[in-house]
Amino acid sequence: MKAAKFTIVATLCFIGFNRPILAQNNTDFNLETFIESLFNLQESDINYEDLYESLLLLYQNPLNINLATTDELKSLYVLSNQQIINLQTYIKEKGKLLTLFELQLIEGFDFATLEKLRPFVTVNAKDAIADNRPLIKRILEERNNYLIMRYEAGLEQKRGYSPKENETDNRYAGSADKLYLRYRVSKPGDFSFGITTEKDAGERMAWQPKNKNYLMDFWSFHFMLENQGKWRKMIIGDYQLQFGQGLLFGAGLSVGKGSETVNTADRVTLGIRPYSSVLESGFLRGAAATYSLNKKLNVTAFVSRLPQDASIQDGAETDDFNQFFSSIQSSGLHRTATEIANKRSVVETLLGTNLNLKPNDRSEAGITLAANHFSTAILRSDDPYNLFEFKGNSNLNFGLYGKYNWQQFSFFGESAISKSGGIGALGGFSTNLSPRIEFAMVFRNYAKDFHSIRGAAFAEGSRNINENGVYWGMKYTLNKKFYLTAYYDTYHFPWLRFRVDAPSSGKDYLIRFNYNPGGRTRMYFQFRKETKEVNAALDEMNDNLILPGTKKQYLANLEFAANHQLSFKSRVQFSDYEINYQLTDGYAFIQDAVYHIKDFVFSARIALFDTEGNENRQYAYERDVLYAFSIPAYSGRGIRNYLLIQYQASRKLELWGRIARTTYYDRTEIGTGLETIDGNKLTNIKLQMRYKLQ
């Protein structure tokens, strides 16, 4: 039996290694393209740095597929529940995989799945061998040990950097340069240590320990140990949490609605995760630990004390508070006198615990309790839509979550209550209706007075509040070349929202046809339609009526590899938006090319765009330097292009250079306020170095 298995596996390896799409060179795998397959067309400038970093870390430190847990496999957003069950059954019955190409012997796995999965997993037997060297030696000799330095700047001068014309003029405190430095050494399942620091454009560099200024404006640090006896994870510094469906703690990894319509419906409990992004809000700072009471039961305790930016106001005109602020300022920018004054003016303290029970790979249950306290009270404006928003100094959340796999079905859910008495809940299931059809369904109901400060569960809105809805997702695989994904989501907002002066509803659906005729050619066509009720101005008096606005989006994408060195991607996207019988539209034509020669990789783009109004802004992913994730908005009429050069100078040293320019043909001035540029061109350069210490 083993001899026969070895012969089959050897044949699969020979076939696989002769397929150009699976070349081992890191540059042959485009992580941006993979992430793009998970998301819908973007509608706002969202930073996906957390997700990008998580996948990139897995890319550089792949999971051992023979040892990976169900949650670890699900967190890749590649495999369905049935595929994971089939994989685990195969390993149990046939033994550990000898090569990844052996996956094609497992029911439900095809070459397209293998292609997506392969960058993030391995069958390296060394991963199963315990490393008994001292911790300091493991850290110093770890190969995933690197330093990154990045410089970024705009070439055109913005008003904020020009000389003052008089004493009352406001200007930025620092230079237009943006600096980034990062050091990290990590080994999944063992340890992680990292320091990240950044100075944004316009911020000043100053060494003023008394004012808590240490040269760069933002610093982040973490040190985590894993699997130290019964201590599963211990971390000090900056971190995030992911429990259940993310209703209370979502760790910034929410994928939401996109072209991957089934595998992203269910979230997984990852517990404590190091934080090394430069987003200056949304994380925790302090300490956390997970202790294994037994093989099935873990308890996690966490504490955080995080200073955050806010504009403190005098509460003399209110009867409730002496001082208050209306919201946390999440931009992280400290360039002007006002922004500097708001820096770290509010301190949020958080205490909590989680109890997680996992009797087997098919079931899970957990309890989460967390208490937040702000040094200054939150009090939003007295606009009607803020009537049920959180106010005061403290909040308390208690939540329950669970998951159960039964035959072809995977059921999941979470519910929680906040100090206000508001309840949030979601539940759903995913299943394989047949070998070719996958299906998922998610129900959600978040009360208008449910307050979850760090929640990131499935939702149409950006927060888990004032919303209920039902989501259906489906994937149909016709054959190895063609598959279809689709979703339909309907939702309702029971109370008013910002710029929506009445309870409102909406719905949207997406359908995407994917066709891969050969190893060097891929294409897809996507259509999305969304109808959402919003305020509509009826006359010059600006009297508003709630009317449905309908947006349609069309996208066609073709990727072609001419040979091992040269590949192209052509993309056309178009949208139109109609409200109150007024129709606007926008489009973008995008052409990419990537060329590999020896130790160089050249990536270039030219994009033409013409859009009307904010609703028709076009968003498109761009290749960028390592650990940078670019999704610019094409707005107005113009052309955008960029050139990215990557050079592998040696085994340890890697260099990047990038220049991007947008030229507008419908304006002679770009931006507003201190960001104003006199002219119609916007140019940005980036230089980056990564040095591997091992």
Image: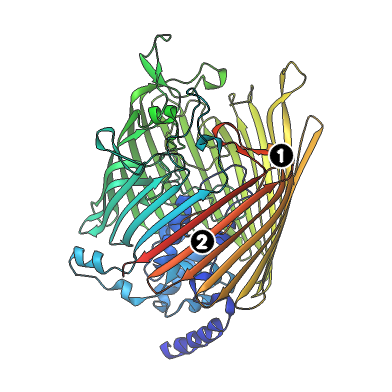
Please give the name of the residue rendered at 37% of the width and 53% of the height, measured from the top-left corner: 181
According to the picture, the residue beneath numbered tag 2 turns out to be 657
Q: Quadrant of residue 335?
A: top left
Above or below: residue 416 compared with residue 591:
above
Left or right: 478 with respect to 104? right
Q: Earlier in the sequence, mark 2 or mark 1?
A: 2
Q: Nearer the viewer, residue 216 or 387?
A: 216
Q: Position of residue 124 (x, y in %)?
A: 37, 75
Report, in whole angstroms, how far the alpha carbon at label 2 lies from the one at label 1. Answer: 29 Å
- Identity of the amino acid at label 1? Arg
Q: Quadrant of residue 224?
A: bottom left
Q: Secondary structure at mark 2?
A: strand
Q: Nearer the viewer, residue 642 or 168?
A: 168
Q: Position of residue 187 (x, y in %)?
A: 32, 63
Tag 2 near tag 1, CB within 8 Å: no
Q: Position of residue 312 (x, y in %)?
A: 40, 22
Q: Position of residue 27 (x, y in %)?
A: 52, 70
Please give the name of the residue rendered at 52% of the width and 16% of the height, measured from the top-left corner: 382
According to the picture, the residue beneath numbered tag 1 turns out to be 667
- Identity of the amino acid at label 2? Gly
Q: Give the colouring mode of the picture.
A: rainbow
Position of the C terminus, as image quadrant, is: bottom left
Crowding around mark 2 (Cα neighbors within 10 Å: few <14, some 14 to 19, many 20+) is many
Q: Nearer the viewer, residue 254 or 193?
A: 193
Q: Quadrant of residue 557?
A: bottom right
Crowding around mark 1 (Cα neighbors within 10 Å: few <14, some 14 to 19, many 20+) is some
Q: Answer whether residue 261 is visible to the viewer in this image.
A: no
Position of the N terminus, as image quadrant, is: bottom left
Identity of the residue furthest to the right in this view:
581
Identity of the residue furthest to the left in this view:
134
Q: Answer whether residue 122 is visible to the viewer in this image.
A: yes
Q: Secondary structure at mark 1?
A: loop
